[in-house]
Amino acid sequence: MSVRRYVNYNGKKYEWDGARWVEYLTRLIPPSTTANQLNKILQVQLKGAPIPKTTTSSVIFYWTWFNYVNDIKELGKTFELNQDNSLIKSMIKGDHIWAFTRKDEKLFVMAMDLVVSHTRDNLSSDPGHKYGKYCAVGDPNRSRYFNVSSVLGIENVLWGLHFFTKETKVDTIGQMFQGINAVRPLTMEEDTRFQQLSNKYSLIT
């Protein structure tokens, strides 16, 4: 059994469960830059003992159907995601970006699992700059584009994400993913759920 350890950082309490860091109260997976700082603090607490292996963070991204269709048609599999949300800039190698879209503006489906290789700032001359100033570049050997014509609808899964509460006042899922909020962090349990679902999907080759 792994030993759980706790670290306070920037006014929040984090828990190490033997596999990754999570924020104690919300169960959110912190950005990888925060996880690395937590590793350093824990190393001091353990008096120089080896720090935990690098943990991954996970976010979900709403890829609007119009953009999805145009991007796939014009660019194909670029293994890149561009957005203004600084969560993109904070990601490191091995992090996951789960992208979903609304097929034919009707059915919510998973579109991509982008496993991050590195990130960069977009130049004004970069094709992705029109979508945002930050770019996450995926590992083509680990990232997956799902066949949206064959994957299962995930609307119930999306409504079950932690940021949809009884107080949430939106009529559609897309309303929660507007502008900079098109990228949102996931909890450890939510990331695991998407990992499990994705194993059932066929891929675009």
Image: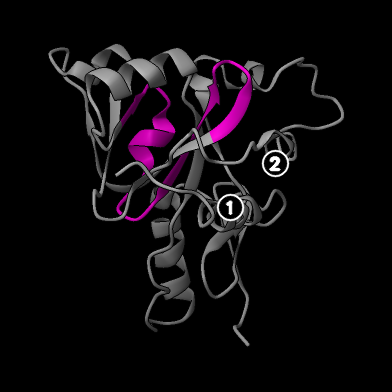
Identify which residue, 108 or 194, lies in the foreground. Answer: 108
Report if residue 102 lies within the magenta region: yes
Mark 2–mark 1 Cα distance, whole angstroms, equals 10 Å
Relative to 178, 91 lies left or right: left
Q: Is residue 49 magenta?
A: no
Classify 91 as above or below 173: below
Residue identifier under label 1: 197
Question: Which is more toward the observer, 184 or 98?
Answer: 98
Q: Bin the neighbour count of mark 2 within 10 Å (Cα to Cα): few under 14, some 14-19, many 20 and up.
A: few
Q: Look at the numbered discs 2 and 1 and tell me whether their residues touch, using CB distance below 8 Å.
A: yes
Residue 42 pos. (x, y %): 47, 71
Q: What residue type is disc 2 on? A: Val
Q: Say which quadrant the N terminus sits in.
A: bottom right
Q: Quadrant of residue 4?
A: bottom right
Q: What's the residue type where badge 1 is placed?
A: Leu
Secondary structure type for disc 1:
helix
* Residue 149 image label: none
Q: What residue lies at 87% left-to-right and 30% top-to-bottom?
A: 166
Q: Which residues are magenta?
A: 81-109
